[in-house]
Image (cartoon, rainbow, N blue to C red):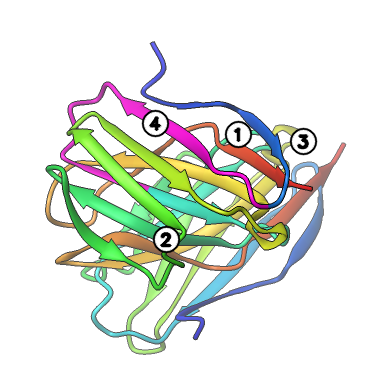
Amino acid sequence: DTAVSQTPKYLVTQMGNDKSIKCEQNLGHDTMYWYKQDSKKFLKIMFSYNNKELIINETVPNRFSPKSPDKAHLNLHINSLELGDSAVYFCASSQGLLGVEAFFGQGTRLTVV
Amino acid sequence: QQQVKQSPQSLIVQKGGISIINCAYENTAFDYFPWYQQFPGKGPALLIAIRPDVSEKKEGRFTISFNKSAKQFSLHIMDSQPGDSATYFCAASMAGRRALTFGSGTRLQVQP
């Protein structure tokens, strides 16, 4: 069983479209995240949810909207896609208040053409 | 503002050699310093982590050295193997903020 699973793995879409990426974790963790990895491999936090509550929103454009229907799921919806949104998006999860291991999904490579 | 600076950007090491990757941080509120390993097409995976109350942590061939006064920490990979070829990221986080701040990554190639 995959601990953190994302779908789809690849996503190619045209500018202006709306798309969603889904994430599920079966680790029983209370916190889930979305990270963006750009073409230079730089990883940056986008959002963090704890027990379905948004706790971190790192100056991400309003076109990006995370939704957490329950503790095990965190989806990312992106409106009006732009060329600059092309990147690999990683979902992750962790448990606990202090610094602990974050488990990452395999990533979703989004290409906007 | 890059709060965790990582060097070198890339590193080539011969099999059996020692790989050393360095990171420096700015925010003294950071209290957890992990290293992640990422293979192509995969998500990052935790390799080893340290807290600032110790100066060194070793797990197998991997060692973190931590210098709190200099705000620096490094990863040493002993007896480097071709299977270690990957991108390595240092990171930092602080209590109360459930997110990792990553360094820019180091692409390691271990030549046979």
- Name the front one of labels 4 and 2: 4
Left or right? Give the position of A110 relative to B101: right
Whether residues under marks 3 and 2 lie with C-beta atoms below 8 angstroms apart, the answer is no
Task: Name the chain under label 1.
Answer: B
- Residue under label 2: A45
Task: Name the chain under label 2.
Answer: A
Going by the numbered disc 4, the residue's amino acid type is Cys
- Secondary-structure class at tag 2: strand
**Distance of mark 4 from mark 2, alpha carbons?**
15 Å
Nearer to the camera, A3 or A61: A61
Percent across and percent down for residue B76 are 56, 57
The crowding category of the residue bearing disc 4, from other C-alpha atoms within 10 Å (few below 14, some 14 to 19, many at least 20), is many
- Residue under label 3: B82
Residue B7's quadrant in the figure?
bottom right
**Distance of mark 3 from mark 1, alpha carbons?**
17 Å
Residue B58 drawn in magenta? no
Task: Name the chain under label 4.
Answer: A
Vertically, is B26 above or below A13? below
- Name the front one of labels 3 and 1: 1
Residue A25 drawn in magenta? yes
Left or right? Give the position of B16 relative to A6: right
Left or right? Give the position of B1 relative to B57: right
- Residue under label 1: B42
Do discs 1 and 4 share a chain?
no
Left or right? Give the position of B29 relative to B3: left
Q: Which residues are magenta?
A: A16-33
Total labels: the figure holds 4
**Distance of mark 3 from mark 2, alpha carbons?**
30 Å
